[in-house]
Amino acid sequence: MSLGIFRAPLRVSFSARHFSSTSSVSARLVSNQPSHTPVSPVSQPSNVPVYLPLSQFLPHAPGTPRARSKVVALDPTVFSHPIRRDILHACVVHYRDSLRQGSASTKSRGEVKCSGRKLRRQKGSGRARLGDAGSPMLRGGGRAFGPKPRDFSTKLNRKVREMGMRVALSAKLRERTLGIVESLQWPGEKTKGLLERLHTLSWPKVLFVSGAEIPESLLRCSNNIQGVECIKAEDLTVYDVVLAKRIVLDVAAVEWLEHQFSKLNLTALASLPSLEAEQTTATEVLP
């Protein structure tokens, strides 16, 4: 009888090499919207920019062009990265570990307040042998192997954390839950007005990310709305991106993220198509 030959399935792994934290590429606005058929950002080559129309955050004023007539050219290494669920999981666990206080503390039998006298003699009573009143078996005694203050934070390489941000942003763009606006300035000062606008846009839960200081009017109006948060780009974490239902970036935030997490070098930048020419690719239009 012959024995069959079993072959192990082929496993493809991705390496996290050649990451850079700086880039000279920034988000650029194109006046005319691409006229060709939109394609998914995941299927694009790594050297082709991802084009995304702007979202209409402010109510449209009659006689003015709509926001979607302008398109933002996004860095493909930041917003079109292959999806890695394992990297996202590692980044989320790393962030949640750092949030733990680690302040739980109990007293051992040597720390509880009690006498060191032996409670009863060793033999002759017919009962179990006992030591002092601090025994963990007795009520009011110490805790055996109880928790002590400790640091629960774990170590994760910087390149893995940077890759996690690229994967998180790319996943949001692929899910069509990432929008870009030209500015986060909100004209009103009433919470009701912002709430009605978010209801019109179907944005019940949204995370606004600003590349500079958060506008005071937007911060004041959104403080009392559940599910709406504002954060600066430099304070954004992978956990924030994964947890948010929808993310809205301004152009300054896009430029900051590309400057921090882009992997394009000068050679790749020179090979990119000119933004003044007619565009050949675009992503799906977001509201």
Image: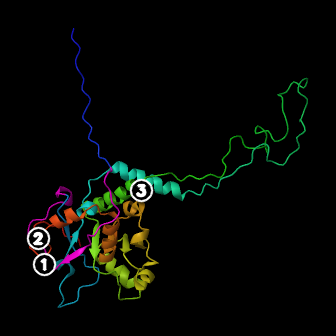
Q: Are marks 2 and 1 in contact (CB under 8 Å)?
A: yes
Q: Is residue 72 left or right of residue 260?
A: left
- Quarter-wise, where is residue 100 in the image? bottom right
Extreme residue in the top direction: 1
Q: Are marks 3 and 1 in contact (CB under 8 Å)?
A: no
- Disc 2 secondary structure class: loop
Q: Which dot marks residue 158?
A: 3
- Residue position marked by numbered label 1 in the rendering: 32
- Whichever of labels 3 and 2 marks the residue nearer the N terminus, that label is 3
Q: Position of residue 56 (x, y in %)?
A: 25, 79
> What residue appears at the point 39 percent right and 60 percent down from the top-left corner?
238
Q: Is residue 103 visible?
A: yes
Secondary structure mostly seen in magenta is loop
Q: Position of residue 236 (x, y in %)?
A: 41, 67
> What residue appears at the point 37 percent right and 88 percent down from the top-left corner?
188
Magenta includes 242? no
| Spatial separation of the CA atoms under disc 3 and disc 1 | 38 Å
Circle nearer the viewer, 3 or 1:
3
- Disc 3 secondary structure class: helix
- Quarter-wise, where is residue 227 in the image? bottom left
Q: Is residue 175 visible?
A: no
Q: Position of residue 125 (x, y in %)?
A: 90, 26
Q: Crowding at label 3, few (<14), some or many (≥20) Cα neighbours within 10 Å?
A: few
Q: Is residue 270 above or below residue 225?
A: above
- Whichever of labels 3 and 1 marks the residue nearer the N terminus, that label is 1
Instruction: Write down the region rendered in magenta.
Output: 16-45
